[in-house]
Image (cartoon, rainbow, N blue to C red):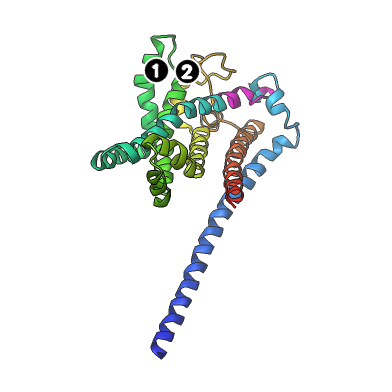
Amino acid sequence: MISSKRNTLSLSSAERRLGAILGLLAVSAALVAVSILFFLIDESRPLLNRISPARLILDASWHPTQGLYDLSPMLSATLLASIGALLLAVPVGIGSALFGRYYASPWLASGYRRMIELLAGIPSVVYGFWGLTSLAPWVARFEPPGVSLLTAILVLAVMILPTVALTADAALAAVPQSRHRCAAALGLSRWTAISGVLLPSARKGIVSGILLAAARAVGETMAVLMVAGNVVRHPHGLFDPVRTLAANIALEMAYAGGDHRAALFASGLVLLCIVLILAGTVQWYKARDFYDQK
């Protein structure tokens, strides 16, 4: 009896130590995120102290050496490329998750998931190289030059497809088996059960995965830099060359100085704010879903 009590106390002490270590790691991760935010604010402050933040979207053009800091063409290109990629990747990703979870045989579903996981691990520069040598010439057949908003959308869609597919598959796998049995007991057809019971049950995880994919699309740099054309202007069509915020930072940081450098850090701050908005949307949606269930 005494030995049993000692083991229980020892286990509780080990769990407390483990909890303390995990809490320290969580705080460290949060501090890294906060330090990056304050770093961007500090680096962009020399410019933002002298100009109104409104000038970042209201100036005539992007010519930092001439005191013009209009980010709106690159911001619009970033948002349009991300939205276009999501419009392509979300239905394909969710459809592939449904196929692998409910329609494919076990061996086929397992092999399909491995292939999607392989896509998730391919470096972004490889996607960019593939888009530049394969997709851009194909797009140029319809309208030159080929490197354009459309090419960026297609490359980004392929890049974020694994994120959407794998998170949707994980969300569907987490649906309680009791709901499967209830749907079967009601005599529902497979698709009726999927659309009416299983997909709504997994919607929180699916939406979170979509927003995570959106954050990756917004921040993608190398692949978009290689295929978008890198022209600073508002796109008037899918075939127009564009430049995103992330690509602009990568292109100009090597030689930027003074206010030009601060403007690039302000661009990074804008990107971080977009990601924070997406993360906040995820938390708001989860909280709303939690209270709706209660």
Residue stretch in magenta: 66-77
Residue in the picture at 53% in, 63% down: 24
Residue in the picture at 36% in, 14% down: 138
Residue in the picture at 41% in, 43% down: 186
> Where residue 123 sits in the image (x, y, percent)?
37, 36
Give residue 93's quadrant in the image: top left
> Relative to residue 19, is residue 121 depicted above or below?
above
**What residue occupies the far bottom of the structure in this picture?**
2
Residue labelled with disc 2 = 148
Tell me the number on the disc at residue 41: none
Q: Which element is circle 1 on?
A: helix
Q: Is residue 31 left or right of residue 100?
A: right
Give residue 257's quadrant in the image: top right
> Where residue 143 sits in the image (x, y, percent)?
44, 9
Tell me the number on the disc at residue 136: 1
Q: Which element is circle 2 on?
A: loop
The three-letter code of the residue at mark 1 reads: Ala
Give residue 55's quadrant in the image: top right
Residue in the picture at 46% in, 24% down: 153
> Where residue 100 sits in the image (x, y, percent)?
33, 38
Nearer the N terminus, badge 2 or badge 1? 1
Q: Is residue 94 left or right of residue 16?
A: left
Was residue 28 drawn as part of the magenta stretch in this picture? Answer: no
Marks 1 and 2: in contact by CB < 8 Å?
yes
The three-letter code of the residue at mark 2 reads: Ser
